[in-house]
Image: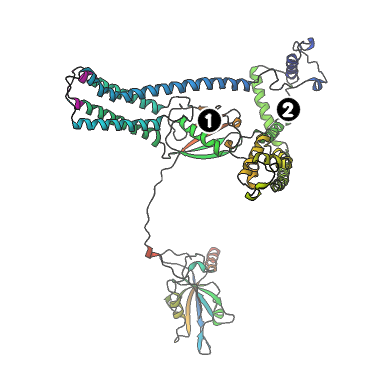
Amino acid sequence: MSFIPGQPVSAVVQRIEIHKLYEGDNLILGFSIGGGIDQDPTQNPFSEDKTDKGIYVTRVSKGGPAEVAGLRLGDKIMQVNGWDMTMVTHDQARKKLTKKNEDVVRLLVTRKSLEETVRQSMMQH
Amino acid sequence: MAEPVQAEISMEELALNSEPSEQHSSLPAQPRQDDNWGETTTAVTGTSEHSLSQEDIVRISKDLDDSVGLDCKRYLNVALSVILGLVVFLTPLAFLILPHLLWPDRLRACGTACEGLYISVAFKLLILLLAVWALFFRPPRAGLPRIFVFRALLATLVLLFVLSYWLFYGVRILDSQDEDYQGIVQYAVSLVDALLFIHYLAIVLLELRQLQPFFSLCVTRSTDGATQHYNLGQLSIQRAAVVILENYYKDFPVHNPAMLTASKSRAAKHLAGLKVYNVDGPGGNNAAAGIAQSQSRAMIAAAARRRDSSHNDLYYEEAEHERRVRKRKARLVVAVEEAFTHIRRMQEEEKKKAPGDVMDPREAAQAIFPSMARALQKYLRTTRQQHLHSMESIQQHLAFCITNNMTPKAFLESYLTTGPTLQYGKDRWLARQWTLISEASVTSGLKDGTIFLLKCIDFSLVVTTKKIPYIKLDEEFIDPKSHKFVLRLQSETSV
């Protein structure tokens, strides 16, 4: 998942569809994000490459919609509803996830184990 | 190898006993084992009262050489330079006076400008005199093995210069008996000016050129590895050696042969561990060389394989020694502090005391010395420094410390740590015993990678030269307004 600035990023991604849940007045997804191009990438415990300024899932609340949909701790979010998440500020990412008029968000997430699974399955054939 | 051992004993006993015994007069073909040779053999020592050892002979001959050679060279140098100086000084005066003596009637009178030049000649000569005295007539600091190349070159230059001026003067002025006295005076002034410029050249060559550091010299003592580094300019090897020796006396701790006995005894133990016996009998030359080589290799291999516990001994010996030194040091410090409390400086008001009670520093030192003498002696013996300090020198040092209001700790400092060689008596200095050993000529300049040795009697200083690297500095400008900072953000938002 290392990226070279200026070159297209390729990754094995998983589609996750989360249905927002009403909690009082708010629609919540049940996870927390960290990262962004205005943040300090070296503090990110989940990234392999410490210069990666992407959006990472830092907490998944138990039993929440995100966990039900298959989101895991440490996932890197690549797209939200078609919006790119690899080069956005933290606040822009938050806004794209918490749009009040949407109750479904479709994420493309990537994690290390996905690549290995694909490689193993390719080797089996 | 029983045969050579027997022969050695026979030679020793021949030397010590005046009458040769017939059983040892010839090398027996079949060795007769004398079973108690261990008790009857005495070891030959280096000196006896009636013989001189090799070292003494070398020392005496060196002293003779030094005293005669040095004085000869020095007097020759002084004589030559005085003669040269006189010639150089009297030349302008001679140029001025000779026309008045030889053709006074034909000379044109000296006008005002000419008389002004007299004053200029006088003062320039005075300045030249002071400058030459300051630069050249200083007591020499060292006796070098070869001539000082720059000085010789300068002396030659001055001589040639003055001779060429005399030549010109003799041909153009004396022969033709020139009447233009002002021209002659100006000629003399130009000579004095040129001499001042040659003196400037002498300062630059002799004093200024070596001030800028160019080489870094690493000096290591061969006996205990004490190392120092010095930065020197472009000097010849002999002048660099003088500078290094001057610094040696103040930077290196004094050479203490008693500290080296431990490693020597360990080395002796290694050698004595294995004995090689030749069971095949003596062979031809080639065989002997081959056997010797294989023997030494066998010895080295066996020594490597043997489980040697000498490292264990070394470790425990050193720990034990450390403990002993610290114990003695503690006793010494307490004894000295207690001794110092027994005396104090007499106050002004106490002048009325009886003169029997009042002591000068030497007597005060003698009064308190016995209480600390034993502790000090034991400490010096443990640290193997006892031959460096005599009782007289210790008492002198004590009187000195009392006079200058020093604390006991200040008094002890010169005994607790080994100081540089200059701190100890003159007989330790051996300043006349140095030999410069060098593969390159000693008047050639230092170069990168020059190695030379300075040998004293028991040890030598190994000097290696390295060129100081050429430093290239780059500049980077920082705008003072460019120092700006932001906070590091790591926020986590829950969605």
**Circle on res. B344:** none
Task: Decide if residue A6 is in sight here.
Answer: no
Q: Residues within 10 Å of mark 1 (few under 14, many from 20)?
A: many
User: What's under tag 1, amino acid-wise?
Assistant: Leu
- Disc 1, SS: strand
Q: Position of residue A62 (x, y in %)?
A: 59, 80
Specify the farthest residue to the right.
Answer: B35
Task: Decide if residue A15 is in sight here.
Answer: yes
Q: From what the image shows, is residue B289 above or below residue A116? A: above
Q: Which residues are magenta?
A: B170-183
Q: Position of residue B375 (x, y in %)?
A: 73, 42
- Of the pair B165 and B27, the residue shown nearer to us: B165
Q: Position of residue A74 (x, y in %)?
A: 54, 72
- Of the pair B17 and B399, the residue shown nearer to us: B399
Q: Which residue is mark 1?
A: B453
Q: Which residue is mark 2?
A: B275
User: Which numbered disc flags the more N-terminal residue, 2 or 1?
Assistant: 2
> In the image, B371: left or right of B440?
right
> In the image, B105: left or right of B363?
left
CA gap between label 2 and label 1 equals 36 Å
